[in-house]
Amino acid sequence: MGGGEKSKSKGGWCGWLLVLVVAAAVVAAIVVLVKKKHGGGSGAPPVPGPPGAVTQKYGDALKIAMQFFDVQKSGKLEDNTISWRGDSAMEDGSSANLDLSKGMYDAGDLMKFGFPMAYTATVLAWTILEYGDQMEVVGQLKPAKDSLKWITDYLVNAHPSPNVLYIQVGDPDIDHKCWQRPEDMTEKRPLIQINTSVPGTEVAAETAAAMAAASLVFKPPYSSTLLRHAKQLFTFADKHRGSYSENIPKVATYYNSTGYGDELLWAATWLYHATGDQSYHDYVTGENGDEFASWGNPTWFSWDNKLAGVQVLLSRVSFFRPKGLSNSQVLLKYRSTAEAVMCGLLPKSPTATSSRTDSGLVWVSQWNSLQHPVASAFLAVVYSDYMLTSRTPKISCDGQSYTPSDLRKFAISQADYVLGDNPMKMSYLVGYGDNYPKYVHHRGASIPAGEATGCKDGFKWLTSTAPNPNVATGGLVGGPFLNETYVDSRNNSMQAEPTTYNSAIILGLLSGLVTTSSVARSFT
């Protein structure tokens, strides 16, 4: 039973009415303070519902989605909310005299892949920076910060010197021959590093982006530590260019990179936000922008391609530029490309993508099909809020005008699809609602908590016909096929496996929809 139904049974409608009134008052107060601080214009924002109203559905879903990070945590667990999880991977990194016990397992397996884990941290930090007030209203800001720090602690330890970064713990060829709880692991956990001889620009730059973004979330001295690592990693990534997929071919089996230019721009953009240093602004608006930005060509935001994220994030600079910074033609190129991305998402736009299911879900890839629509919806709600906060009334899509409300409606349509408004009438967010996947491809969830298993004997739980004994609460599974069907089977990793980066993007989307509050003009 999902979070909403549980809450009703505990408090009843009268209790919830009181909670909603109080919560709405709190958010309304926040909105007033934000408007006073930012000097916003008059008039109600053109979005459905009163300013600051809490949408319980998205608040409930956000609380559930946040829990998947606790499901995925490695190391010595502290105040973990998941009863069937315990300490694990305590020796990770010991072969290099490092403590890499923290971090998060990538998906249903027990691998730590640094590239998508760093992306998870970057998006989670971005969400906190944009929607921290909204998260606080529903009690999810502290859990979000705790989970972010769990990853950044790992990333700091994985970067023992300026030009060395450990990017993987575990060997997937070994790991995927086992089916066991993380608490029972005994297999060797080899490490992979990048360095000046074996560069991996995209991973180093993504990790720099994560550190820079997170430095804006936390206070000194931790924020200073993160920023120092971010600067070192960006310099390493930029000076020693080379794709990790080409230099370490075996990593391409699972997280093949299609290029590193987007990560360099992404990292420089986050460093500009974190430091205000003009050199990072010049980096993205100079020859590197010319080489890598792909202006005018909309792309899909994902763990592999950050260009749409760069364009939206640099649009923030254009919308809310600090005093003394001109709205350069190059910044406007980023913003116009971001608008092209938005126009492609709006279903009635003349330039709308035709890559959709019959029910309107954006469709890009059969494997982990929900990644792209959820990430796109997150960018749409962020861009909508930039427009609202800056009092920008519309964007133009091939001569047709669209409002922030149109972008928000698109984001809502994708979120609602995930939460059950789909032909299967299934919530793809595990634990939300009454009908969600029960055979999630996830080792820890599939094996009873008290059942000690070795590498091989746990496979009986993979093939069991019984539902998972533990709920992988908050996991966003891969999602439906193009024909909008879903096969609830543990062996169906294409559809039934949740990932940490899926959790980051659904948290971002839900946080943007919890209330109608505007975003802050500055991260600092």
Image (cartoon, grey):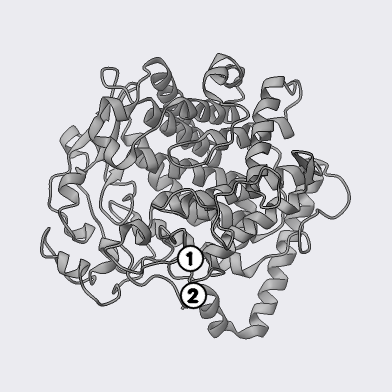
Q: Which of 493 and 363 is in front in this view?
A: 363
Secondary-structure class at tag 1: helix
Q: Nearer the viewer, residue 437 or 385?
A: 437
Quadrant of image for the C terminus = top right
Q: Nearer the viewer, residue 157 or 393?
A: 393
Q: Where is residue 457 in the image (x, y as percent from the top left)?
A: 11, 65
Residue 9 visible? The answer is: yes
Report the amino acid beneath label 1: Ile
Q: Where is residue 121 in the image (x, y as percent from the top left)?
A: 45, 43
Q: In this view, does 298 lie to the left or right of 49?
A: left
Residue drawn where x is 52% and y is 55% of the image:
507
Residue 221 visible? The answer is: no
Residue drawn where x is 40% and y is 22% of the image:
237
Q: In this view, does 91 lie to the left or right of 371?
A: left
- Which residue is tagged 1? 64
- Which residue is tagged 2? 2
Report the amino acid beneath label 2: Gly
Q: Where is residue 50 in the image (x, y as percent from the top left)?
A: 78, 63
Mark 2 crowd level (few <14, some 14–19, many ≥20, 10 Å Cα): some
Q: Position of residue 223 (x, y in %)?
A: 49, 35
Classify 474 as above or below 367.
below
Does label 2 or label 1 sit earlier along the sequence? 2
Classify 48 as above or below 328.
below
Mark 1 crowd level (few <14, some 14–19, many ≥20, 10 Å Cα): many
Query: Which label was assigned to residue 80?
Result: none
Instruction: Please tell me in which quadrant of the rendered image residue 356 appears.
Output: bottom right
Q: How many labels does the image show?
A: 2
**Between marks 2 and 1, how big is the CA–CA gap?**
8 Å
Instruction: Please tell me in which quadrant of the rendered image residue 282 appears.
Output: top right
Cβ–Cβ under 8 Å for marks 2 and 1: yes
